[in-house]
Amino acid sequence: MRFLYNLDPFDGAHAQPFRARKEVLLRVNPELSTAIYGGDNQRVDRIRILPYFSWVMDISQQVNKAKFFRRATGRQRTAAGVFFVVTVSAWLLFHLAANGKVDLGILVGPCGFEQQYNLPCPTCGMTHSAIAFCEGKVLESFYIQPAGALFCSVLAICAFLALLTGVFGVYFTHIDRFFREVRIGRIIAALLIITAAGWAVTIARAIAAKN
């Protein structure tokens, strides 16, 4: 096995199999691979000093691009488009509610938990928090109900990613990795913890207001 020895300023001196290194570079950039290593029959067995960071960064950027992004399928673009439309529709609904054109109280109704125990329930304040968030009052949204504002922030990020996927066909491979490696139970547990933390804040604020 022939080896190509590099004195790489990023990770020090190390040895890599010439064939494996060449194949990786060939997949990333065939022209760059040919320029550096030459043809298939050319033997490269010598010390290389790599002070030229330009092509190193070029390889890194192309590897990252191939790793984090890929072309979305038609089904993925459709799903992303539907998610984006639903999210924007919800944002428009809260925006109309903020301007007094829609009464969300009719849809939500009074809180039975608050009426019975005179304390806010875990979801109390989330509607007002979402309305403030949709108006661009992010800090006020977090003050009203931190959990609701955090959920709105996550939805805003997801909507932006869905826009890129649905319109431009850019699919983020980390989405598949996230749902493959993270169990649904952990996601539910995280949502419950965030909701409980937001509830604790609203309860503490309600008790302080009574005193």
Image (cartoon, rainbow, N blue to C red):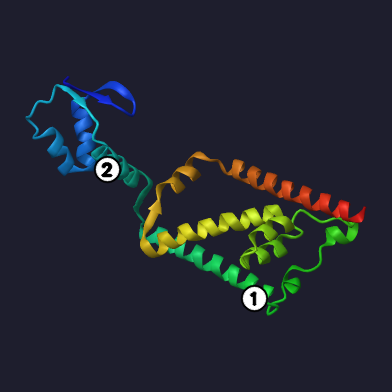
Image spot of residue 131 (x, y percent): 67, 67
Residue pictured at 73% horizontal, 46% vertical: 197
Residue at image mark 1? 96
Q: Specify which label sits upstream in the sequence, 2 or 1.
A: 2
Q: Is residue 151 left or right of residue 120?
A: left
Amino acid at dot 2: Asp
- Nearest to viewer (mark 2 / mark 1): 2
Amino acid at dot 1: Leu
Q: Residues within 10 Å of mark 1 (few under 14, many from 20)?
A: some
- Element marked by disc 1: helix
Residue found farthest to the bottom: 101
Residue pictured at 9% horizontal, 33% vertical: 40
Q: Residues within 10 Å of mark 2 (few under 14, many from 20)?
A: some
Q: Is residue 191 above or below residue 164?
A: above
The quadrant where residue 143 appears: bottom right
- Element marked by disc 2: helix
Image spot of residue 6 (x, y percent): 24, 24
The quadrant where residue 190 appears: top right
Q: Nearer the viewer, residue 202 or 190?
A: 202
Image spot of residue 168 (x, y percent): 37, 62
Image spot of residue 13 (x, y percent): 28, 21
Q: Is residue 87 left or right of residue 11?
A: right
Q: Measure how far apart labels 2 and 1 are at the Cα level.
A: 48 Å
Q: Is residue 182 left or right of residue 47?
A: right
Q: Nearer the viewer, residue 24 or 76?
A: 24
Residue at image mark 2? 58
